[in-house]
Image (cartoon, rainbow, N blue to C red):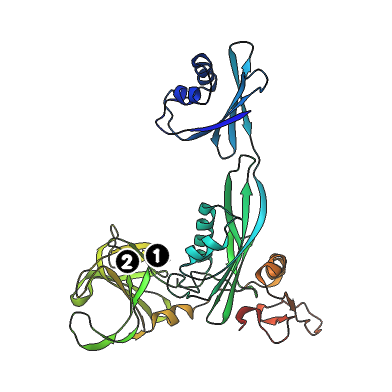
Amino acid sequence: MTRRDTIHRGDGVIAVLMKAGLSRADAVGVLQASELRATARRTIPIAVFADSAAAQIREVELQLADDRSLRVQRSGLSGWTAVERRELWRADTVTVRAVIKGSLVESLRDGGRGEISVRGRLEMAYAVAEAFEYKLDVGSDLVRGDSVVAVIQRHRTAFGAERVGPLLAGALRHDGRWLRAIRFSTREGSGEYYDVEGRPMRTTFLAAPLEFRRMSSMFGMRLHPLLGIRRRHDGIDYAALLGTPVRTVGDGAVIKADYEGGYGRVIEIRHRDGMVTRYGHLRGFAKALRAGQVVTQGQVIGFVGSTGLSTGPHLHFETLVNGVSREPTRTLRNASGVALTGPALTAFAGARDAVAARLGFAVPRPVAPQSTGSATTIRPNALDITRPGTRVSDTK
């Protein structure tokens, strides 16, 4: 016979053990053998095992961690001894498919029901967003009817504990095109994401300066909310909570961190190739941020505010190329990283092929190079697709 209960933080351990069926003397013995504090400092699930015939409790199991428990067993008539038990994490691979009905989080939460815990599905959604954050702003670009596929590693113990990650591969169908990302580790670094032809998902610039946001005003002509006139809007506005961290979309040098008219508190960062990014209406700047400071991609530079000509908390974001304002979304996604070649590309192909069926695409095969009498490096653009009439990277 087994009884289960939970010792919550702040509970008296003896009281909970007695509630589960132990006598006071046995509860004290279990507490002493386990070396726990009399008042619990964390949540501890317990299982009490009794002999059905004698109705005598013979063992109490306390789950101290996801992979560690303490078995306190009766020893003699009144003694108790504790034995620690560690559980191995057993890994498997799970594929979750979903159609976008609301946000990415909501869609994967519903799509992964029964396969992965609620917490695991939330972590999976964040992992998908991070894998594609250089190519797609999942907070605003995805619309109802788009699709998502996530291939993720799941780890479980006999206790029922679960951890998910890393994301092995993912796919997003948006605007009639598939984007696919496959995780691969080179000898030189940690795991990164690449498209099916070995080109890095990570590029020179992030797709957006905020992690969690919705787009409230698009680039182009609009009716100014305060002035009441139509005037060009050189940028994108991201509505967000006051104080939300703002990150730089790329490496660069701060050329302005000051208060300037309608922009309010504004930061300008110069990047390579004549690109400047501008972040306006800020509540404040990151500590010690100043003109001349070098910043790195993803670094927090300020916080969302409503300074200057603003109707409420939001971030005004602009990109300028050689002094001319450009549409931010298109400008940031034009930059690309260095593709895999040679042995690294060959090794990557193995990782890609292992998840091809799960992501729903045909495996590319290298086009045989013409013999020239010298070694040839297979380049990512020298890949053919076995499925007729399609390209893996942009299936319609």
Coordinates of residue 156 in the picture (x, y in percent): 62, 46
Of helix, strand and loop, which one carries label 1?
Answer: loop
Res. 129 visible in picture: yes
* Residue 132: x %, y % from top left: 52, 69
Which residue does the image show at 59% across and 38% down from the upper left? 67
229, above or below 305, in the image: below
Q: Is residue 269 above or below residue 60?
A: below
Q: If the image is split into quadrants, where does the C terminus sit?
A: bottom right
Instruction: Place residue 84 in its image quadrant.
Output: top right
Relative to residue 155, is residue 9 depicted above or below? above
Element under label 2? Answer: loop
Q: Residue at x 29, y 70 (%)?
A: 314
* Disc number for residue 278: none
Q: Position of residue 86 (x, y in %)?
A: 63, 34
On the picture, is 49 further left or further right than 230? right
* Image-based side of 280 in relation to 67, left or right: left
**Separation of marks 1 and 2 at Cα, in angstroms:** 8 Å
Q: Amino acid at mark 1?
A: Phe
Number of numbered discs on residues? 2
Q: Are marks 1 and 2 in contact (CB under 8 Å)?
A: yes
| Residue 379 pos. (x, y %) | 68, 78
Question: Toward the viewer: 285 or 317?
Answer: 317
How would you rate the neighbour count of disc 2 (Cα within 10 Å): few for under 14, some for 14-19, many for 20 or more? Answer: many
Farthest residue, direction front: 53
Estimate how packed mark 1 is, as few (under 14), some (14 to 19) or many (20 or more) residues with alpha carbons within 10 Å: some
Judging by the rendered image, the residue that carries numbered circle 1 is: 212
Location of the N terminus (image quadrant):
top right
Q: Is residue 350 above or below residue 263?
A: above
Label number found at residue 240: 2
Q: Amino acid at mark 2?
A: Ala
- Is residue 189 visible in the rendered structure shown here? no
Q: Residue at x 60, y 55 (%)?
A: 114
